[in-house]
Amino acid sequence: MKLENRERRMTAKIANLEGFRPLKVPKVRKPREGLIGVSVSCHMCRNVYSFRVPKKSYLKWVNKEELIQVALPNLSVAERELLISKTCSGCYEKLTGMQ
Ligand SMILES: [Zn+2]
């Protein structure tokens, strides 16, 4: 009777393990962050500039959860300026040169 109980417990343990294992497999590989294309038209020269940004980070900036330099550190200063003020680097230089 005692033995039978132990056996049943062990069987239950094994069944538990087997039921658990597929769920417990850790996902080591980090999924690559999806990139999205962003097109910005300069409000001065009307040229359209396109570049790719990580979607999650971009949305964080759009939703004002993060500063652009924190969310999108890989963008150049000119690209960030374009996103923020819709002014391309050429026009920005003209603007600041006029001041
Ligand atoms: Zn421009």
Image (tube, rainbow, N blue to C red):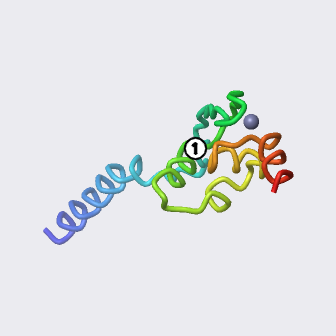
Residue 15 at what x, y percent from top left? 29, 52
Residue 93 in picture, x, y percent from top left: 84, 48
Report the side of 94 relative to 9 (left or right). Answer: right
Camera-nearest residue between 88 and 60: 88
- Residue at 80 percent across and 43 percent down: it is 89
Displayed quadrant of residue 82? top right
Ligand 1: give its quadrant. Answer: top right
Label 1 crowd (10 A; few <14 / some 14-19 / many >=20): few
Quadrant where the N terminus lies? bottom left
Residue lying furthest right: 97
For disc 1, does the CB lie below 8 Å from ligand 1? no
Above or below for 41 versus 79:
above
- Position of 79 with respect to 65 (left or right) is right
- According to the image, label 1 marks what residue? 31
Mark 1: which secondary structure? loop
Q: Is 16 situated above or below 45?
A: below
Q: Is residue 1 depicted above or below 64 in this figure?
A: below
Q: Nearer the viewer, residue 83 or 76?
A: 83
Percent of width and height locating residue 70: 64, 62
Outermost residue, left direction?
A: 1
Which image quadrant for residue 73? bottom right
Label 1 is placed on what type of residue? Pro
Residue 25 in the figure: left or right of residue 42: left
Mark count = 1
Residue pushed farthest top? 47
Is the C terminus in the top left, top right, bottom left or bottom right quadrant? bottom right
- Residue at 69% over, 36% down: 44
Instruction: Work out which residue is located at the far bottom of the displayed protein and give it.
Output: 2
Give the percent coordinates (x, y) of residue 68.
62, 57
Residue nearest the viewer, comparing 18 with 24: 24
